[in-house]
Amino acid sequence: MTKILLIEDNEAVRENTADILTLANYEVLTAENGQKGVEKAKTFLPDLVVCDIMMPQMDGYEVLRKLAMDPETANTPFIFLTAKTDRADMRMGMNLGADDYLTKPFEENELLEAIDCRLKKHDSLKKQIVENLEGINTFLEEASEYVNLEGLTKNHSLRPYEKKEIVFWEGDNAHSLYFIESGTIKTYKGTESGKELVTGIYGPGDFVGQLSLLNASGKYVENAIILEDAELCAIPKDDFLKLLYGNHVVAQKFISMVSNDLIDVQTHLVDMAFASVRQRAAKALLELYKKGLIKDKPNGGMSIPREDFAGMIGTATETAIRTLSDFKDEGLITTDSGRRIIILDRAELEQVADFTR
Protein backbone atom coordinates (compact mmCIF):
# COMPACT_ATOMS: atom_id res chain seq x y z
CA MET A 1 0.00 0.00 0.00
CA THR A 2 1.31 3.47 -0.93
CA LYS A 3 2.34 5.44 2.15
CA ILE A 4 1.61 9.15 2.54
CA LEU A 5 2.85 11.43 5.31
CA LEU A 6 0.49 14.36 5.97
CA ILE A 7 1.98 17.30 7.89
CA GLU A 8 -0.65 19.91 8.83
CA ASP A 9 -1.04 22.01 12.00
CA ASN A 10 -4.80 22.68 11.56
CA GLU A 11 -6.52 19.75 13.24
CA ALA A 12 -9.74 19.92 11.18
CA VAL A 13 -7.86 20.12 7.86
CA ARG A 14 -5.47 17.38 8.96
CA GLU A 15 -8.26 14.96 9.95
CA ASN A 16 -10.43 15.66 6.89
CA THR A 17 -7.49 15.29 4.51
CA ALA A 18 -6.37 12.09 6.23
CA ASP A 19 -9.89 10.66 5.82
CA ILE A 20 -9.88 11.48 2.10
CA LEU A 21 -6.54 9.74 1.62
CA THR A 22 -7.48 6.71 3.71
CA LEU A 23 -10.70 6.21 1.74
CA ALA A 24 -8.59 6.36 -1.42
CA ASN A 25 -6.67 3.32 -0.13
CA TYR A 26 -3.50 5.11 0.96
CA GLU A 27 -1.72 4.30 4.20
CA VAL A 28 -1.65 7.64 6.01
CA LEU A 29 0.48 8.90 8.88
CA THR A 30 -0.13 12.42 10.22
CA ALA A 31 1.98 14.98 12.05
CA GLU A 32 0.76 18.23 13.63
CA ASN A 33 3.90 20.25 13.01
CA GLY A 34 7.05 20.28 10.90
CA GLN A 35 9.39 19.01 13.59
CA LYS A 36 7.30 15.91 14.24
CA GLY A 37 6.79 15.48 10.51
CA VAL A 38 10.54 15.27 9.87
CA GLU A 39 10.95 12.78 12.73
CA LYS A 40 8.14 10.56 11.46
CA ALA A 41 9.42 10.70 7.88
CA LYS A 42 12.69 9.08 8.93
CA THR A 43 10.91 6.00 10.32
CA PHE A 44 7.78 5.90 8.15
CA LEU A 45 9.69 6.48 4.88
CA PRO A 46 6.62 7.66 2.95
CA ASP A 47 6.14 7.33 -0.80
CA LEU A 48 4.91 10.94 -0.85
CA VAL A 49 4.67 13.88 1.56
CA VAL A 50 1.78 16.36 1.73
CA CYS A 51 2.81 19.33 3.85
CA ASP A 52 1.41 22.70 4.93
CA ILE A 53 3.72 25.71 4.66
CA MET A 54 2.76 28.01 7.57
CA MET A 55 3.27 25.94 10.73
CA PRO A 56 4.71 26.54 14.21
CA GLN A 57 8.21 25.35 15.20
CA MET A 58 9.21 24.46 11.63
CA ASP A 59 7.55 25.69 8.44
CA GLY A 60 7.05 23.62 5.31
CA TYR A 61 10.08 25.08 3.54
CA GLU A 62 12.34 23.91 6.35
CA VAL A 63 10.67 20.48 6.35
CA LEU A 64 11.51 20.15 2.66
CA ARG A 65 15.11 21.22 3.28
CA LYS A 66 15.51 18.69 6.10
CA LEU A 67 14.07 15.82 4.07
CA ALA A 68 16.24 16.74 1.08
CA MET A 69 19.35 16.40 3.24
CA ASP A 70 18.53 12.81 4.23
CA PRO A 71 19.43 10.22 1.54
CA GLU A 72 16.46 8.05 2.56
CA THR A 73 13.91 10.83 2.01
CA ALA A 74 15.68 13.10 -0.49
CA ASN A 75 13.82 11.71 -3.51
CA THR A 76 10.36 11.55 -1.94
CA PRO A 77 7.72 13.47 -3.96
CA PHE A 78 6.59 16.53 -1.99
CA ILE A 79 3.32 18.49 -2.32
CA PHE A 80 2.71 21.76 -0.49
CA LEU A 81 -0.69 22.65 0.97
CA THR A 82 -1.13 26.35 1.70
CA ALA A 83 -3.59 29.20 1.95
CA LYS A 84 -0.98 31.49 0.39
CA THR A 85 -1.29 32.27 -3.31
CA ASP A 86 1.68 34.58 -3.84
CA ARG A 87 3.70 33.46 -6.87
CA ALA A 88 6.95 34.26 -5.06
CA ASP A 89 6.03 31.76 -2.36
CA MET A 90 5.16 29.16 -4.96
CA ARG A 91 8.44 29.76 -6.80
CA MET A 92 10.39 29.47 -3.56
CA GLY A 93 8.83 26.08 -2.87
CA MET A 94 9.51 24.83 -6.38
CA ASN A 95 13.11 26.06 -6.23
CA LEU A 96 13.61 24.05 -3.05
CA GLY A 97 12.45 20.91 -4.87
CA ALA A 98 8.71 20.72 -4.22
CA ASP A 99 6.81 18.77 -6.87
CA ASP A 100 3.41 20.45 -6.64
CA TYR A 101 1.46 23.17 -4.86
CA LEU A 102 -2.21 23.03 -3.80
CA THR A 103 -3.99 26.12 -2.48
CA LYS A 104 -6.48 25.67 0.38
CA PRO A 105 -9.36 25.19 0.27
CA PHE A 106 -9.01 22.45 -2.35
CA GLU A 107 -11.44 19.94 -3.78
CA GLU A 108 -11.05 16.25 -2.99
CA ASN A 109 -10.43 15.37 -6.62
CA GLU A 110 -7.72 18.07 -6.89
CA LEU A 111 -5.78 16.46 -4.05
CA LEU A 112 -6.14 12.90 -5.32
CA GLU A 113 -5.28 13.84 -8.91
CA ALA A 114 -2.18 15.74 -7.78
CA ILE A 115 -1.00 12.79 -5.69
CA ASP A 116 -1.70 10.25 -8.43
CA CYS A 117 0.09 12.39 -11.03
CA ARG A 118 3.18 12.88 -8.87
CA LEU A 119 3.45 9.21 -7.95
CA LYS A 120 3.19 8.15 -11.61
CA LYS A 121 5.80 10.66 -12.76
CA HIS A 122 8.10 9.68 -9.92
CA ASP A 123 7.76 6.00 -10.85
CA SER A 124 8.47 6.74 -14.50
CA LEU A 125 11.73 8.48 -13.59
CA LYS A 126 12.83 5.48 -11.55
CA LYS A 127 12.63 3.17 -14.57
CA GLN A 128 15.81 2.03 -16.25
CA ILE A 129 16.71 4.32 -19.14
CA VAL A 130 17.32 2.58 -22.46
CA GLU A 131 20.81 3.63 -23.52
CA ASN A 132 19.97 4.95 -26.97
CA LEU A 133 18.62 8.19 -28.46
CA GLU A 134 15.01 7.11 -27.99
CA GLY A 135 15.69 6.44 -24.31
CA ILE A 136 17.39 9.81 -23.86
CA ASN A 137 14.51 11.67 -25.50
CA THR A 138 12.00 9.77 -23.38
CA PHE A 139 13.88 10.76 -20.22
CA LEU A 140 14.02 14.42 -21.31
CA GLU A 141 10.29 14.41 -22.02
CA GLU A 142 9.47 12.90 -18.62
CA ALA A 143 11.94 15.17 -16.80
CA SER A 144 10.42 18.25 -18.43
CA GLU A 145 6.92 17.25 -17.34
CA TYR A 146 8.09 16.28 -13.86
CA VAL A 147 9.69 19.59 -12.94
CA ASN A 148 8.05 21.88 -15.52
CA LEU A 149 11.42 22.83 -16.97
CA GLU A 150 10.82 25.69 -19.35
CA GLY A 151 12.83 25.70 -22.55
CA LEU A 152 14.28 22.21 -22.11
CA THR A 153 15.16 20.89 -25.55
CA LYS A 154 13.43 17.63 -26.45
CA ASN A 155 13.64 15.22 -29.35
CA HIS A 156 17.35 15.64 -29.96
CA SER A 157 18.65 14.44 -33.32
CA LEU A 158 21.81 12.60 -34.32
CA ARG A 159 24.75 13.95 -36.27
CA PRO A 160 27.09 11.59 -38.15
CA TYR A 161 30.85 11.86 -37.55
CA GLU A 162 33.61 10.25 -39.59
CA LYS A 163 36.69 8.45 -38.34
CA LYS A 164 39.42 10.85 -37.11
CA GLU A 165 36.97 13.77 -36.97
CA ILE A 166 37.43 15.99 -33.89
CA VAL A 167 34.40 16.34 -31.61
CA PHE A 168 35.99 18.99 -29.39
CA TRP A 169 39.44 20.33 -28.54
CA GLU A 170 40.90 20.79 -25.09
CA GLY A 171 40.60 24.48 -24.21
CA ASP A 172 37.59 25.18 -26.42
CA ASN A 173 34.44 26.58 -24.79
CA ALA A 174 32.46 23.65 -23.37
CA HIS A 175 29.04 24.03 -24.97
CA SER A 176 27.59 20.50 -25.19
CA LEU A 177 27.38 17.09 -23.60
CA TYR A 178 27.64 14.31 -26.21
CA PHE A 179 25.76 11.02 -26.17
CA ILE A 180 27.14 8.18 -28.32
CA GLU A 181 24.43 6.35 -30.25
CA SER A 182 26.93 4.36 -32.35
CA GLY A 183 30.64 4.27 -33.05
CA THR A 184 33.63 4.89 -30.78
CA ILE A 185 35.25 8.00 -29.29
CA LYS A 186 38.68 8.46 -27.73
CA THR A 187 39.33 11.22 -25.20
CA TYR A 188 42.87 12.25 -24.47
CA LYS A 189 45.09 14.99 -23.12
CA GLY A 190 48.26 16.27 -24.75
CA THR A 191 51.49 16.34 -22.77
CA GLU A 192 54.32 18.86 -22.95
CA SER A 193 56.45 16.24 -24.72
CA GLY A 194 53.87 15.94 -27.48
CA LYS A 195 52.54 12.54 -26.39
CA GLU A 196 48.94 11.60 -25.74
CA LEU A 197 47.49 10.47 -22.43
CA VAL A 198 44.33 8.53 -23.29
CA THR A 199 41.68 9.36 -20.69
CA GLY A 200 38.99 7.06 -22.07
CA ILE A 201 37.58 5.08 -24.96
CA TYR A 202 33.80 5.20 -25.17
CA GLY A 203 31.14 3.41 -27.17
CA PRO A 204 27.35 3.30 -27.63
CA GLY A 205 25.43 4.37 -24.52
CA ASP A 206 28.28 6.48 -23.10
CA PHE A 207 28.48 10.25 -22.61
CA VAL A 208 31.51 12.49 -23.09
CA GLY A 209 32.12 16.08 -22.03
CA GLN A 210 30.22 16.06 -18.74
CA LEU A 211 33.17 16.91 -16.51
CA SER A 212 34.12 19.78 -18.82
CA LEU A 213 30.64 21.31 -18.45
CA LEU A 214 31.19 21.42 -14.69
CA ASN A 215 34.69 22.85 -15.02
CA ALA A 216 34.94 26.36 -13.51
CA SER A 217 36.88 27.59 -16.54
CA GLY A 218 34.01 26.72 -18.88
CA LYS A 219 36.50 24.94 -21.18
CA TYR A 220 36.79 21.36 -22.37
CA VAL A 221 39.43 19.65 -20.23
CA GLU A 222 40.41 17.07 -22.86
CA ASN A 223 40.25 16.33 -26.57
CA ALA A 224 37.69 13.99 -28.16
CA ILE A 225 38.24 12.30 -31.52
CA ILE A 226 36.26 9.70 -33.47
CA LEU A 227 37.95 6.28 -33.63
CA GLU A 228 35.17 4.62 -35.65
CA ASP A 229 32.40 6.32 -37.65
CA ALA A 230 29.86 7.49 -35.11
CA GLU A 231 26.47 9.08 -34.56
CA LEU A 232 26.33 11.56 -31.70
CA CYS A 233 23.60 13.54 -29.99
CA ALA A 234 24.64 16.93 -28.59
CA ILE A 235 22.83 18.07 -25.44
CA PRO A 236 23.31 21.84 -24.92
CA LYS A 237 25.02 23.04 -21.75
CA ASP A 238 21.90 24.97 -20.69
CA ASP A 239 19.86 21.75 -20.75
CA PHE A 240 22.63 19.92 -18.89
CA LEU A 241 22.54 22.50 -16.08
CA LYS A 242 18.74 22.53 -15.91
CA LEU A 243 18.68 18.76 -15.50
CA LEU A 244 21.43 18.92 -12.91
CA TYR A 245 20.01 21.71 -10.76
CA GLY A 246 16.29 21.84 -11.56
CA ASN A 247 15.09 19.07 -9.24
CA HIS A 248 16.87 16.62 -6.94
CA VAL A 249 15.00 13.54 -8.24
CA VAL A 250 15.72 14.40 -11.87
CA ALA A 251 19.32 15.31 -10.98
CA GLN A 252 19.99 11.97 -9.31
CA LYS A 253 18.66 10.07 -12.32
CA PHE A 254 20.55 12.28 -14.75
CA ILE A 255 23.83 11.95 -12.85
CA SER A 256 23.52 8.16 -12.85
CA MET A 257 23.00 8.30 -16.63
CA VAL A 258 25.95 10.51 -17.53
CA SER A 259 28.52 9.35 -14.99
CA ASN A 260 29.92 6.49 -17.15
CA ASP A 261 30.64 4.95 -13.72
CA LEU A 262 33.16 7.44 -12.33
CA ILE A 263 34.18 4.81 -9.77
CA ASP A 264 35.98 3.14 -12.68
CA VAL A 265 37.93 6.36 -13.22
CA GLN A 266 39.08 6.35 -9.60
CA THR A 267 40.02 2.68 -9.87
CA HIS A 268 41.96 3.40 -13.05
CA LEU A 269 43.98 6.10 -11.29
CA VAL A 270 44.83 3.69 -8.47
CA ASP A 271 45.89 1.10 -11.04
CA MET A 272 48.13 3.62 -12.79
CA ALA A 273 49.86 4.33 -9.49
CA PHE A 274 50.29 0.83 -8.09
CA ALA A 275 49.66 -1.89 -10.69
CA SER A 276 52.25 -3.33 -13.06
CA VAL A 277 52.06 -2.76 -16.83
CA ARG A 278 50.91 -6.36 -17.25
CA GLN A 279 48.10 -5.87 -14.75
CA ARG A 280 47.05 -2.54 -16.27
CA ALA A 281 47.01 -4.07 -19.75
CA ALA A 282 44.82 -6.96 -18.63
CA LYS A 283 42.41 -4.61 -16.91
CA ALA A 284 42.24 -2.33 -19.95
CA LEU A 285 41.38 -5.29 -22.18
CA LEU A 286 38.61 -6.33 -19.80
CA GLU A 287 37.22 -2.78 -19.71
CA LEU A 288 37.15 -2.65 -23.50
CA TYR A 289 35.47 -6.05 -23.56
CA LYS A 290 32.84 -4.83 -21.07
CA LYS A 291 32.10 -1.86 -23.34
CA GLY A 292 31.74 -4.22 -26.31
CA LEU A 293 34.69 -2.65 -28.12
CA ILE A 294 36.59 -5.93 -28.28
CA LYS A 295 35.05 -9.39 -28.45
CA ASP A 296 35.70 -13.01 -27.61
CA LYS A 297 35.04 -14.19 -31.17
CA PRO A 298 36.47 -13.36 -34.63
CA ASN A 299 35.29 -10.40 -36.70
CA GLY A 300 33.86 -8.57 -33.71
CA GLY A 301 34.70 -5.33 -31.99
CA MET A 302 37.11 -2.75 -33.34
CA SER A 303 40.79 -2.44 -34.07
CA ILE A 304 42.39 -0.51 -31.19
CA PRO A 305 45.46 1.47 -32.34
CA ARG A 306 48.38 0.23 -30.28
CA GLU A 307 49.46 3.77 -29.43
CA ASP A 308 45.97 4.43 -28.01
CA PHE A 309 46.13 1.24 -25.99
CA ALA A 310 49.53 2.34 -24.67
CA GLY A 311 48.01 5.68 -23.69
CA MET A 312 45.24 3.91 -21.78
CA ILE A 313 47.70 2.02 -19.61
CA GLY A 314 50.28 4.79 -19.30
CA THR A 315 53.26 3.18 -20.98
CA ALA A 316 55.32 3.38 -24.17
CA THR A 317 53.83 1.92 -27.35
CA GLU A 318 56.65 -0.62 -27.60
CA THR A 319 55.97 -1.83 -24.05
CA ALA A 320 52.26 -2.15 -24.75
CA ILE A 321 52.93 -4.16 -27.93
CA ARG A 322 55.34 -6.44 -26.06
CA THR A 323 52.77 -7.02 -23.29
CA LEU A 324 50.06 -7.87 -25.82
CA SER A 325 52.49 -10.26 -27.53
CA ASP A 326 53.10 -11.96 -24.19
CA PHE A 327 49.36 -12.37 -23.68
CA LYS A 328 49.08 -13.81 -27.18
CA ASP A 329 51.88 -16.31 -26.52
CA GLU A 330 50.13 -17.36 -23.30
CA GLY A 331 46.87 -18.01 -25.13
CA LEU A 332 44.96 -15.21 -23.39
CA ILE A 333 44.24 -13.24 -26.56
CA THR A 334 44.70 -13.43 -30.31
CA THR A 335 44.20 -11.07 -33.25
CA ASP A 336 42.44 -11.40 -36.58
CA SER A 337 43.47 -10.15 -40.01
CA GLY A 338 42.20 -6.66 -39.15
CA ARG A 339 44.40 -6.44 -36.03
CA ARG A 340 41.31 -6.72 -33.87
CA ILE A 341 42.06 -8.17 -30.44
CA ILE A 342 40.05 -11.29 -29.54
CA ILE A 343 39.91 -12.46 -25.93
CA LEU A 344 40.45 -16.20 -25.60
CA ASP A 345 40.69 -16.68 -21.82
CA ARG A 346 38.77 -14.00 -19.93
CA ALA A 347 39.03 -15.80 -16.60
CA GLU A 348 42.82 -15.86 -16.76
CA LEU A 349 42.92 -12.20 -17.79
CA GLU A 350 40.85 -11.40 -14.70
CA GLN A 351 43.44 -13.23 -12.61
CA VAL A 352 46.24 -11.18 -14.16
CA ALA A 353 44.30 -7.93 -13.66
CA ASP A 354 43.77 -8.55 -9.94
CA PHE A 355 46.80 -6.62 -8.65
CA THR A 356 45.77 -7.24 -5.02
CA ARG A 357 46.92 -10.84 -5.39
Image (cartoon, rainbow, N blue to C red):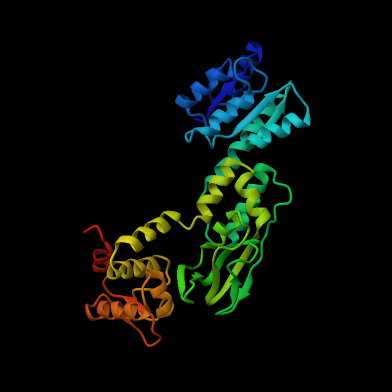
The single residue placed furthest to the front in the displayed view is 192
In this rendering, would 34 be left or right of 276? right
**Residue 304: where, in percent of width, then height?**
42, 78
Taking depth in this image into account, of 44 and 293 the one nearest to the observer is: 293
Residue depicted at 62% across the width and 49% down the height = 243
Q: How many marks?
A: 0
**Residue 99 seen:** no
Residue 268 occupies which quadrant of the picture?
Answer: bottom left
| In the rendered image, the vertical position of residue 87 relative to residue 223, given as above or below | above
**Residue 267 seen:** yes
Residue 225 occupies which quadrant of the picture?
Answer: bottom right
The single residue placed furthest to the bottom in the displayed view is 337
| In the rendered image, the vertical position of residue 134 relative to residue 121, given as above or below | below
The C terminus, quarter of image:
bottom left
Residue depicted at 29% across the width and 80% down the height = 322
The single residue placed furthest to the top in the displayed view is 11
**Residue 97: where, in percent of width, then height?**
62, 36
In this rendering, would 106 be left or right of 23? right
Residue depicted at 37% across the width and 88% down the height = 337
Taking depth in this image into account, of 353 and 137 the one nearest to the observer is: 353
| In the rendered image, the vertical position of residue 5 relative to residue 200, given as above or below | above
